[in-house]
């Protein structure tokens, strides 16, 4: 046995393990020391200003956030084209922007992160909004919000960003919003604001996999009755053709008005912002059912989960606030007032340390991006950007 | 020991690198598919065999393959249809298509694009169209081909001129010959009758033969009488009407033959070139002062007439006489109106700002006074209009913080103290870009897709009474203007729609708008339309304006603008004809106004331009020297200093009012006198 052990410790294999172990130790020591080392870290992100037709490139150095470039977007200098959704390619080389207003269809524009110049573009549907790229399929999934048209099922555009070709449109619900991809890249989730549904799309099969009605039946029974009565009266007074009448009857008015869905990075759960019902809805993705609901302030809008899976961050749009919940017990940890009104989008740094919140403002007020520490839950810094700041995307952390 | 340690470390790193490189190389697979150069017939379904191979040639089946047509679902018009459940594709539209295949296997993906051809259906029959079997010697035969394919689809010769047809024809056998030397066929397949008698034209197309017998008669025309119907001193831009009457040897008039008109000319100014336009009905216009020879011919018989065309010489001095400066934000549209107190007022909107609209007293145009303003929840107040009685102003909203936009109705009975009386958003939440007030109704655009018609007899309680939309997939609208019960909507690529909203021409009303006329043009940039009944000729035109930014937004300086005004003769609403254009080189059109046969147009970077559009109109109006004058409106005090960007113009009580994106509202006066040239540099004694 002893001889065997001596052989073992003299073997190449053991020495390799030992060497690897030493490297590992060095790495561990560096990791332990890292908070005390004075590395200069910077975080970069993009934010779109819908009523200014600009995108701002922001840099945050752990103390101050600053606008380092403002990029004019769109093609009509005298028309507001409404940059709404923004996302960065997983490889960090490109960023993608949806322009909500076109003639009438909106566009998806591809920009280089190196130059912030247009690389390519393609036409999508009516009011293209939020989007994300799947690391598995490589495709970009963008919801066509169509929030101003006749209430009708809209769709999700699937785009191959390599060729900037819209491959297909997948029909979902009325006013789809909040396109987010599952951690494994195989599913895309969006919610339909007016029809109150959660849609799961098979990212490879390019078809709807499952649909979940998000209405709280208790609430629906109480409140829908009044709304429906009102609607019945109005419809009696309206001169409508039979087809339109039929379409309106088939289309429900959600009380939940879901505006965002975010799947958990590690668990088979997704969280939905009930903008109309002032709640967060937890969905068990395995059993495809609502597993919890908890109340929020007025008008939760966007949601994101820190990459470490510990915190849920939500903008409370109507109150101009940002809420932070611990996902272990779903307790509200902090509720912060944003620097200006109408809190909108959220981007979280890849190290789960900071949340960047865009707020729209009203009229001629500038949009503002706030930085919130996810360790102290304090507002650290703010920067003014273009009017109606909305879509926001984290790009990179640089040492 | 230390050396050994480094050696160990190196090995460990190598192994890590090797493992990592396996991961990298495992992703480098090539995609193979029998899609390459695939040819499909229309309707044919094909299931491709697609897989990937690695660098060692190992084959990997695709766990999933996604195919798509590279042009996309919007632009390809479903040229190839994909059944992603079955993994098949189906040929829909003939032509060459690029199909992208993406193969997913073992957690990696590989991709490649392939050229797939959907065959045009084979031609089944060909019909040679010549109009008549009898032609005259020394004339060309007006040939066209009507090709019917095996699927029963008929295409005409126009296909030959398009890119798709070029590809279509280039791959197929096509020949045209005659059976004798009485027809001369050139390299471009034009056929000229050169000898009297009979000849047969033979066509072979895609293996299908067709022939047509032609009788070639002696040219009966021995003389042409060329008359000029209007005779006076001609100026550039004047339309001359030539009438050519062919006679036979007995002196009889020959009917039913088409005389060819042509011209050549020489400019009076040797540094210039003569140019103009002649139509086959004999209408001629000279753009440049010079001597022109107009010819009418049939076969080898022709007659000419010489005309001198002189300078139009209508330039007048235009001077800016007043400005209402707005230099803390961009200015959008404006409207000048007579108030209930008979004084003169204006309202201006603002763009990309804080939702403000300004009210001005313009009674003394040289002393424009800002007298009041309203601020609403919006970023852009793009359009502003005032009711004909001067009591109600309506402004449009875009970028409202609650995304409900709509319109704001304002009581302007006292323009010094305007009062908001109603916010109206129903069906208008997507933003109102433009609107128009006509008597009791307001026409308001909705989300750039349609317009709603609201009754505003009780302005505190507007009532929606009607809606108009083109009704096409992707319908889009930019503007609407109403005159004499006809609404003229400008619908980008769908052109102008003439809609009866009370005129009676098509039985329409505000609650029952009925479209009765439409005209589109190739650029698809129809942004505004102004109806114009010529006082001097009685002709009726729709003047359709473009809006084009050829290089998009220039964040560093002046935006380049393009596009022009299209004069479409709508005298026959069923057969509108585009007859003239006003195009200012280097500058693009925006909004405009026509009064007393004079056009006042905001040409964005080209300033305010004033154009004589009297008399008959034909060809290039700018080149013809029809411009009376202009002003550039950029100001050192502007929001963007010295950057002219005129939004629109309106003639009001003899003054030319305008709004400029960077300076606000201004007013100019067209003088009776010619422009002063005392400061112009001179090189000639």
Image: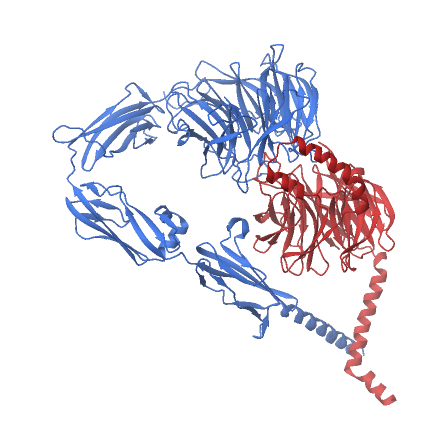
Chain colours: A red, B blue
Residue drawn at (27%, 19%), measured in percent from left and top? B231
Left/right of residue B662 with respect to residue A64 in the rendered view = left
Between residues B168 and B25, which one lies in front from this camera angle? B168
Between residues B438 and B19, which one lies in front from this camera angle? B438
| Residue B104 x/y as whole percent | 62, 65
Between residues B468 and B32, which one lies in front from this camera angle? B468
Q: Is any atom of residue A149 visible in this view? A: no
Left/right of residue A76 with respect to residue B250 in the rendered view = right
| Residue A18 x/y as whole percent | 81, 76
Quadrant holding the N terminus of chain B: bottom right
Left/right of residue B470 with respect to residue A280 in the rendered view = left
Q: With respect to residue B14, does A216 lie above or below?
A: above
Residue at the outermost left position: B250
| Residue A269 x/y as whole percent | 78, 57
Q: Where on the picture, by quarter, is residue A89?
A: bottom right
Residue drawn at (74%, 48%), measured in percent from left and top? A260
Q: Where on the picture, by quarter, is residue A23?
A: bottom right
Quadrant holding the C terminus of chain B: top left
| Residue B182 x/y as whole percent | 17, 48
Q: Is any atom of residue B225 visible in this view? A: yes
């Amino acid at each position: 046995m002893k001889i065997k052990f001596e052989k073992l410790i003299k073997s190449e294999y053991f020495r390799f393990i030992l060497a690897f172990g030493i490297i590992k130790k060095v790495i561990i020591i560096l990791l332990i020391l890292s908070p005390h080392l004075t590395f200069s870290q910077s975080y970069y992100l993009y934010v779109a200003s819908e009523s200014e037709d600009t995108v701002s490139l922001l840099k945050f150095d752990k103390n101050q956030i600053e606008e380092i470039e403002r990029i004019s977007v769109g093609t009509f200098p005298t028309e507001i084209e409404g940059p709404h959704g923004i996302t960065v390619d997983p490889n960090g080389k490109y960023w993608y922007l949806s322009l909500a207003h076109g003639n009438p269809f909106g566009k998806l524009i591809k920009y280089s992160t190196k130059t912030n110049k247009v690389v390519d573009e393609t036409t999508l549907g009516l009011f293209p909004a939020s989007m994300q790229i799947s690391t598995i399929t490589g495709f970009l999934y963008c919801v066509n919000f169509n929030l101003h048209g006749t209430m009708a099922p809209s769709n999700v555009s699937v785009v191959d960003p390599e060729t900037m070709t819209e491959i297909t449109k997948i029909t979902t619900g009325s006013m789809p919003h909040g396109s987010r991809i599952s951690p494994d890249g195989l599913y895309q989730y969006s919610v339909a604001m007016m029809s109150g549904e959660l849609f799961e799309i098979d990212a490879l099969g390019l078809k709807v996999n499952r649909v979940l009605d998000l209405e709280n039946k208790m609430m629906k029974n109480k409140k829908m009755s009044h709304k429906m009565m009102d609607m019945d009266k109005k419809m009696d007074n309206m001169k409508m053709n039979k087809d339109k009448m039929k379409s309106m009857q088939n289309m429900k008015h959600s009380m939940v008005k879901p505006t965002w869905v975010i799947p958990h990075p590690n668990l088979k759960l997704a969280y939905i912002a009930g903008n109309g019902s002032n709640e967060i809805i937890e969905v068990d993705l395995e059993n495809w059912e609502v597993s919890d609901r908890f109340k929020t302030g007025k008008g939760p809008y966007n949601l994101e989960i820190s990459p470490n899976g510990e915190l849920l961050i939500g903008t409370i749009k109507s109150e101009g606030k940002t809420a932070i919940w611990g996902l272990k017990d779903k307790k509200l940890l902090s509720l912060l007032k944003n620097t200006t009104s109408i809190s909108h989008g959220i981007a979280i740094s890849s190290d789960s340390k900071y949340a960047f919140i865009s707020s729209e403002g009203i009229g001629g007020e500038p949009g503002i991006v706030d930085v919130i520490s996810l360790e102290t839950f304090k507002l650290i810094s703010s920067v003014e950007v273009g009017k109606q700041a909305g879509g926001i995307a984290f790009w990179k952390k640089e040492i | 020991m230390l050396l050994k340690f480094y050696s160990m470390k190196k090995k460990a790193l190598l192994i890590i690198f090797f493992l990592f490189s396996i991961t990298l190389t495992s992703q480098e697979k090539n995609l193979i598919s029998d899609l390459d150069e695939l040819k499909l017939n229309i309707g044919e379904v094909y299931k491709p065999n697609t897989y990937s191979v690695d660098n060692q040639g190992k084959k990997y089946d695709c766990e999933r393959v996604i195919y798509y047509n590279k042009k996309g679902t919007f632009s390809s018009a479903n040229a190839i249809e994909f059944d992603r459940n079955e993994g098949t594709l189906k040929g829909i539209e003939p032509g060459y298509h690029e199909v992208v295949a993406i193969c997913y296997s073992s957690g990696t993906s590989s991709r490649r694009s392939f050229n797939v051809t959907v065959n045009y259906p084979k031609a089944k029959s060909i019909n040679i169209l010549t109009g008549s079997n009898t032609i005259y010697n020394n004339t060309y035969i007006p040939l066209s081909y009507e090709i019917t394919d095996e699927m029963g689809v008929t295409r005409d010769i126009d296909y030959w001129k398009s890119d798709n047809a070029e590809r279509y024809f280039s791959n197929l056998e096509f020949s045209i010959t005659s059976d004798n030397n009485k027809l001369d066929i050139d390299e471009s397949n034009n056929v000229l009758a050169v000898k009297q008698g009979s000849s047969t034209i033979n066509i072979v197309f895609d293996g299908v033969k067709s022939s047509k017998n032609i009788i070639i008669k002696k040219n009966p025309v021995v003389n042409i009488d060329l008359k000029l119907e209007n005779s006076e001193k001609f100026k550039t831009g004047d339309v001359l009407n030539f009438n050519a009457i062919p006679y036979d040897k007995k002196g009889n008039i020959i009917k039913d033959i088409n005389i060819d008109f042509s011209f050549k000319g020489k400019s009076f100014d040797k540094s210039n070139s003569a140019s103009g336009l002649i139509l086959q009905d004999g209408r001629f216009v000279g753009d440049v002062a010079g001597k022109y020879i107009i010819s009418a011919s049939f076969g080898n018989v022709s007659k000419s007439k010489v005309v001198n065309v002189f300078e139009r010489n209508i330039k007048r001095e235009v001077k800016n006489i007043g400005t209402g400066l707005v230099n803390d934000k961009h200015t959008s549209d404006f409207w000048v109106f007579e108030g209930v107190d008979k004084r003169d007022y204006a309202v201006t909107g603002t763009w990309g700002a804080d939702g403000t609209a300004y009210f001005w007293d313009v009674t003394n145009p040289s002393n424009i006074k800002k007298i009041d303003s309203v601020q609403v929840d919006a970023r852009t107040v793009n359009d502003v209009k005032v009711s004909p009685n001067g009591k109600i102003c309506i402004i449009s909203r875009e970028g409202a913080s609650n995304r409900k936009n709509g319109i704001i109705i304002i009581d302007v009975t006292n323009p010094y103290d305007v009062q908001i009386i109603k916010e109206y958003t129903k069906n208008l939440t997507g933003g109102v870009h433009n609107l128009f007030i006509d008597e009791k109704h307001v026409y308001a655009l909705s989300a750039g897709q349609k317009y709603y018609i609201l009754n505003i007899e009780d302005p505190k309680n507007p009532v929606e009474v009607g809606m108009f939309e083109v009704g096409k997939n992707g319908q889009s609208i930019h503007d609407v203007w109403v005159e004499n019960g006809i609404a003229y909507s400008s619908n980008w690529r769908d052109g102008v729609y003439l809609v009866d909203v009370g005129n009676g021409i098509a039985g329409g009303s505000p609650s029952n708008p009925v479209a009765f006329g439409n005209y589109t043009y190739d650029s698809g940039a129809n942004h505004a339309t102004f109806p114009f009944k010529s006082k001097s000729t009685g002709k009726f035109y729709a003047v359709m304006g473009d809006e084009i930014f050829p290089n998009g937004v220039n964040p560093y300086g002046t935006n380049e603008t393009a596009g022009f005004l299209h004069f479409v003769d709508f005298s026959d609403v069923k057969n509108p004809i585009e007859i003239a254009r006003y195009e200012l080189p280097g500058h693009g059109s925006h909004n405009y106004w026509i009064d007393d046969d004079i056009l006042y147009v905001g040409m964005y970077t080209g300033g305010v331009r004033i154009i004589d559009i009297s008399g008959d109109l034909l060809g290039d109006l700018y080149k013809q020297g029809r411009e009376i004058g202009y002003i550039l409106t950029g100001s050192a005090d502007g929001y963007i200093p010295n950057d002219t960007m005129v939004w629109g113009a309106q003639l009001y009580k003899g003054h030319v009012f305008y709004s400029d994106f960077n300076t606000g509202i201004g007013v100019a006066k067209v003088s009776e006198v010619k422009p002063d040239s005392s400061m112009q540099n001179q090189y000639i004694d």
